[in-house]
Image: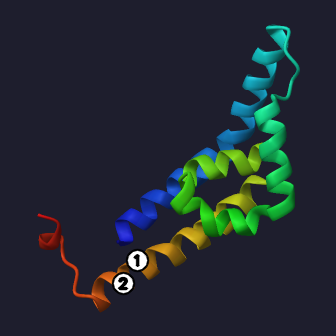
């Protein structure tokens, strides 16, 4: 579990710090193709993000879209990369501990999946 958590934190940081560059690239490409900078889907996602915020993203992100993509989306929505990295990492660690606890509490082992 420790290696999985460490690897996930690294991917969160990479996507958080690369998220703004990805967003800028997408916007440039849309404008070059004669489209508005913001797609309707992005506007809808932005509205949901503004309503629920980074903290709900940290809770739901690991089970809905995955932490790396949530990190990129959060940065694209305007949250600073350091805050995204810290908040999403804490949320992911909470999920990892909860899942590990469930496995131990119910005696689930890797042999159970074979």
**In this rendering, position of residue 42 left or right of residue 11:** right
Q: Secondary structure at mark 1?
A: helix
- Estimate the x, y position of residue 28 in percent, counting from the top left: 80, 18
Can you tell which quarter of the image residue 57 is in? bottom right
Q: Which residue is pictured at 47% across the width and 58% down the height?
A: 8
Tell me, for residue 99, which label it has, or none: 1
Can you tell which quarter of the image residue 29 is in? top right
- Estimate the x, y position of residue 83 in percent, counting from the top left: 75, 62
Measured in 3D between alpha carbons, the distance from the residue under mark 1 to the one under mark 2, in whole angstroms, is 5 Å
Q: Which residue is pictured at 38% across the width and 86% down the height?
A: 101
Q: Which residue is pictured at 78% across the width and 37% down the height?
A: 42
How is the structure coloured here?
A: rainbow
Position of 63 relative to 72 (above/below): below
- Estimate the x, y position of residue 54 in percent, counting from the top left: 76, 63
User: Is residue 7 in sight in this rendering?
Assistant: yes
**In this rendering, position of residue 14 left or right of residue 51:** left
Is disc 1 surrounded by few (<14), some (14 to 19) or many (20+) residues within 10 Å? few
Q: Which residue is pictured at 19% across the width and 77% down the height?
A: 109
**In this rendering, position of residue 56 left or right of residue 65:** right
User: Is residue 77 in sight in this rendering?
Assistant: no
- Estimate the x, y position of residue 81 in percent, counting from the top left: 73, 53
> Nearest the camera: 92 or 80?
92
Assess whether mark 2 and mark 1 are in contact (beta carbons under 8 angstroms).
yes
The residue identified by callout 2 is 102
Q: Residue furthest bottom?
A: 105
Position of 99 relative to 44 (above/below): below
**In this rendering, position of residue 2 left or right of residue 39:** left
């Amino acid at each position: 579990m420790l290696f999985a958590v460490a690897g996930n934190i690294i991917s969160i940081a990479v996507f958080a710090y690369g998220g703004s560059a990805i967003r800028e690239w997408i916007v440039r490409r849309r404008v070059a193709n004669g489209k508005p900078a913001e797609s309707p889907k992005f506007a809808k996602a932005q509205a949901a993000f503004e309503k629920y915020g980074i903290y709900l993203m940290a809770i739901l992100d690991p089970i809905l879209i995955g932490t790396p993509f949530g990190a990129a989306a959060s940065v694209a929505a305007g949250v600073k990369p350091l805050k995204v990295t810290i908040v999403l990492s804490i949320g992911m660690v909470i999920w990892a501990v909860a899942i590990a606890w469930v496995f131990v509490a119910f005696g689930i082992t890797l042999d159970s999946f074979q």
